[in-house]
Image (cartoon, coloured by chain):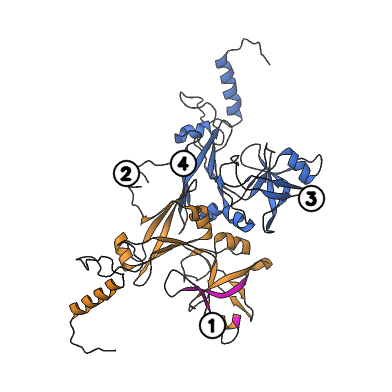
Chain colours: A blue, B orange
Amino acid sequence: MNMSTTIDRSHIEALVRKAIAEAGGLASSSGAQPGKPAVAPLGWVDGKPNLRVSISARHCHLTDEHVEILFGPGSVLEPDKDLYQDGFYAAKQTVMVVGPRRRMLPNVRVLGPTRPFSQLELAFTDSISLGIDAPVRHSGKIDGTPGCVLVGPAGSVQLDQGVIRAARHVHMNDHDAAYYGVANGDMMQLVIKSHDCSVTFDDVLVRADKAAKLEVHIDTDEGNACHLDAASEVILQKMPGACACGH
Amino acid sequence: MNMSTTIDRSHIEALVRKAIAEAGGLASSSGAQPGKPAVAPLGWVDGKPNLRVSISARHCHLTDEHVEILFGPGSVLEPDKDLYQDGFYAAKQTVMVVGPRRRMLPNVRVLGPTRPFSQLELAFTDSISLGIDAPVRHSGKIDGTPGCVLVGPAGSVQLDQGVIRAARHVHMNDHDAAYYGVANGDMMQLVIKSHDCSVTFDDVLVRADKAAKLEVHIDTDEGNACHLDAASEVILQKMPGACACGH
């Protein structure tokens, strides 16, 4: 829609700042400053990124077509619980996953919304239980990965590929990326300080876009290896380069 | 036994060196050198420690009394497979472990020899499956830990305590400790380089004695978090101190 008004840009910005300030959402009460965003970036608290580290338990993503096969014609995913990233949710629906040698996982949660391809994300421990040798892959990079059978109340689906162990990654928006001095596709390091079991995870892929909130995703094996629930400190940082200290 | 012979010490050492050299077990074919051990330290290869990293799957240790209760009067542990550390073995026997809320692990391997106390060592994932909140502890430090029920073919045992998640540690002998510049009770760092999932484990406790071979023990969660089986490099090092690089 093409708005034909004569109101100028600075006036619009002032109105927006005022409206947001009245709603309590402005990063700085003194208004926009040169070089600083006028509005608090998504997910920031007290003018800084608010780091969240989440454990992704095993789950699957489905296409619209597979939802109808598994749950019946006309079925759609029913949101049960919102995830931290806006627009994403755990669905009410679960599937049974069947691997080779008659092994299975009875209740694997479906996450929504639907996608152009179906994909099963397991921790390595899960994949061993299921008897599937799942490779570490980033979401969507499923060429040549193993398949499995998904079973729902209305039918079953043979996936020829799509079983992966999701590689650790961090969602962030462009403001977060600027704060850390990283770009989409870079690798970062996540340090978890836990009593008697501190761990540093390398190879944390940056997935930066306009809309994400800062959130690291690791799997249950990784979360358990460092006892994340009892962690005393979490630090996200750029991968250190070679330096004289030998690290 | 007190041997009353007049043969001198240097002659004995020469005889021992000769015998070992003939058996192909001498570190240096030119014989002992000042400051170097005359005989290759246990587990060393090519004059250096030979680092091994092993995943300890869930297992239990039993007292002699509990072996008899679980497997019948007069029963002893029957070695099935030697472990890397001399004198230790996986027994033929397994036990069923029962947790609260009717959850159980059907076949948990018993390791031998027997001990003065019974102890169940789980990965964190196992403890969640079993419904027991197992704390990270070093072997033998079981005061105040949760218990469980062990069930064998001849009877069952209620453990009032002893369920732990074994803290990561490294067995080594005194020569290994000297090589790394560490002492019994120190903490080290284990770096695992794996494609897309490299990890650095802090808090690796040094357990040094005269007889051990160099071997890091981590649990299945830790091994899976770094995909140990596919690792391209493993590095054991002293915990780095604070340095200018900020690591």
The residue at which mark 1 appears reads as B76
Chain name for mark 1: B
Crowding at mark 4 (Cα within 10 Å: few <14, some 14-19, many 20+)? many
Between residue B81 and residue B94, name the one nearer to us.
B81
Question: Could you tell me which residue is drawn at 24 percent across and 74 percent down?
Answer: B18
Q: Amino acid at mark 2?
A: Ala
Q: Does any portion of residue B120 appear in the rendered image?
A: no
Measure how far apart labels 4 and 3 are at the Cα level. Answer: 41 Å
**N-term-proximal mark, 2 vs 1:** 1
Q: Considering the numbered disc 4 on the image, is that residue within a helix, a strand or a loop?
A: strand
Please tell me the numbered disc located at residue A188.
4
The Cα–Cα distance between marks 4 and 1, rounded to whole angstroms, is 52 Å
Q: Which residue occupies 34% across, 72% down? A: B210
Dot 3 corresponds to which residue? A153
Tag 1 secondary structure: loop
Judging from the image, mark 2 belongs to the subunit labelled: B
Locate residue B46 relative to residue B134 in the image: left or right: left
Q: Residue at x 52, y 63 (%)?
A: B135
Amino acid type, label 4: Met
B45 over B1 or under it: above or below = above
What's under tag 1, amino acid-wise?
Val
**Image position of A70 with respect to B91: above or below:** above
User: Magenta span has A48?
Assistant: no
Residue at label 2?
A: B244
User: Which one is in front in this view, the residue at disc 4 or the one at disc 1?
Assistant: 1
Callout in the foreground (4, 3): 3
Q: Which residues are magenta?
A: B71-97
The spot of residue A180 in percent (x, y) is 45, 36
